[in-house]
Amino acid sequence: MTGWEAGADLVVVGSGVAGLTAALDAAAAGLRVVVVTKDGIGEGSTRWAQGGVAVVLGDVAGDSLGAHVADTLAAGGGLNDAVAVDTVVRGGPGAVRRLRGRGALFDHDGDRPARTREGGHSAFRVVHAGGDATGAEIERALVAATRDAGVTVLDGHVAVEALREVTGRVVGLAVLAGDDAGVLRAPAVLLATGGYGQLYSSTTNPGTSTGDGVAIALRAGATAADLEFVQFHPTVLWTGPAVGRRPLVTEAVRGEGAVLLDRTGHAFMAGVHPLADLAPRDVVAAAITRHTAETGSDCAWLDATALPGFATRFPTVFASCREAGIDPRTDPIPVNPAAHYACGGVVTDTWGRTGVPGLYAAGEVARTGLHGANRLASNSLLEGLVVGERVVRAVCEDRAAAGPALLTAPVEPAPALPVADRATLQRAMSRHAAIGRDAAGLAAASDAVEAATTVGVPVGRAGVEDAALTLLAQAVLAAAGTRRESRGCHVRTDFPDRDDAHQAVSLRVRLDAAGRPVVVTDALAGAA
Ligand code: SIN
């Protein structure tokens, strides 16, 4: 039940790069903006990003916006939206300039920004900060700017449900602070909640990445797409089986010369892809998974011993390794893939508009079509910056066109929802819906999630998150079962080939009348 109410022109859910960029632009445009964030401001997934921001600033010989577009399309496995790719790549230089204007300090090489390279990039075009602490520096700058701008931030508040008037238009958000329920009434709600890495036992994502935004959007009538494309980062520090957030070993380490080895010291990526260790991320993650299974190893090893100045160039990775008793200056780093990024999400245009009036999404929670079936490294911070700015322009335009809200009735009590036991769900998804899926495993995962599910009114933050994870597990499994081919991050061992003749199309997911996610794209007619 509702304990309190407040009003705003724009409610932003999430305090990562997309959310805070939008909040700052909205405040600058004179909107009353409220940021709702589950932990403290800036404690979501952005701060853990290491590598950097992929952007063409025009000062690297041989690089161009066209090359960045081509690399993004090549990585995306034929499912990118060309307009989204063009818009985000071309919007990058201006967005990075404005971010620097907000105080973000990037690393320099003389009087120019320093650049690194990551998997799938044909040029050194990734700008970085603090060596390998790019996300942390971006968050530091955006949080400071948000405080300076006097934006209202509700720390420790969980978004529960989008409120809609009879026409379906979103007119606010139900939130929870501990046991205290409240309502924020606003003509625009922006979901910037990040991804759903917590579907898996082992992930680079923090505990906040529980798919809340996708779940809220689906329940409000929006469409999601490309949910089966969960990107696994190839190189996450391996210290034995472990659950929860695991330390990333940025791809920039390979970009600057490190090589993946197997237990015999063989550099196995050389025979897998022409770009070898710098192949796109889906290729490297799948190769590690295949090679470790074939050789009976728990992990692969990343040999960075020839890199000069490792401790200062990669201080975050160095600290994680030292904590685990590994010295990357003298020893190869044990690594394995772990869940890292949701390439799909809530379907939006390049202005962050979902199909539901009043509801917007930006950053990892959204599916603009930039990433296709596999995101190019360091395009995610870029997308958050570019769409985080554009969405405010859409909010302002839509606000000018919209009539007064019709909602006057009291907010309904929270509905009962399916809620699965989180550890069971994570085990099932990790075993059957990670890299290398097949029909029998996906069915087994669905059965396991079903068996661990009860229906009830979610209680507190954990209940809201578990309900979101349950919905996301059902949706990912439905999409992964429907796509009977291998493409990008979606690797089916029972359908190992890509099927461009029948399946070169995104799968869209909506909720049916019973609230279950169903794949609505009739894309697979004629597929084997
Ligand atoms: C990394 O630094 O390897 C991760 C960057 C990204 O996910 O784009």
Image (tube, grey):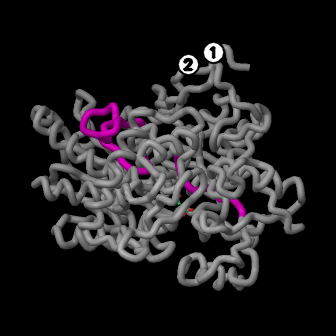
Neighbour tally class for label 2: few under 14, some 14-19, many 20 plus, Cα within 10 Å: few
Label 1 is placed on what type of residue?
Ala
Secondary element under disc 2, as helix, strand or loop, is: loop
Q: Position of residue 363 (x, y in %)?
A: 40, 50
**Which numbered tag is attached to residue 301?**
none
Residue drawn at 53 percent across, 30 percent down = 506
Q: Position of residue 15 (x, y in %)?
A: 34, 62
Given residues 522 and 311, the one toward you in this image is: 311
Residue drawn at 69 percent across, 48 percent down = 283
Residue drawn at 50 percent across, 35 percent down = 80
Task: Establish if 434 lies above or below 298.
Answer: above
Tell whether position 343 is magenta.
yes
Task: Establish if 137 lies above or below 68.
Answer: below
Which quadrant of the view contains residue 147? bottom left
Q: Is residue 434 visible in this depiction of the protein?
A: yes
Label 2 is placed on what type of residue?
Asp
Location of the C terminus by quadrant is: top right
Q: Is residue 418 visible in this depiction of the protein?
A: no
**Segment colored magenta:** 336-365
Q: Are marks 1 and 2 in contact (CB under 8 Å)?
A: yes
Q: Position of residue 336 (x, y in %)?
A: 72, 62
Residue 96 relative to residue 316: left or right: left
Given residues 127 and 497, the one toward you in this image is: 127
Q: Residues under labels 1 and 2: Cα distance?
A: 7 Å
> Which residue corresponds to mark 1?
525
Given residues 288 and 225, the one toward you in this image is: 288
> Which residue corresponds to mark 2?
522
Neighbour tally class for label 1: few under 14, some 14-19, many 20 plus, Cα within 10 Å: few
Residue drawn at 64 percent across, 84 percent down = 323
Which quadrant of the view contains residue 407? top left
Given residues 32 and 249, the one toward you in this image is: 249
Furthest-top residue in this view = 526
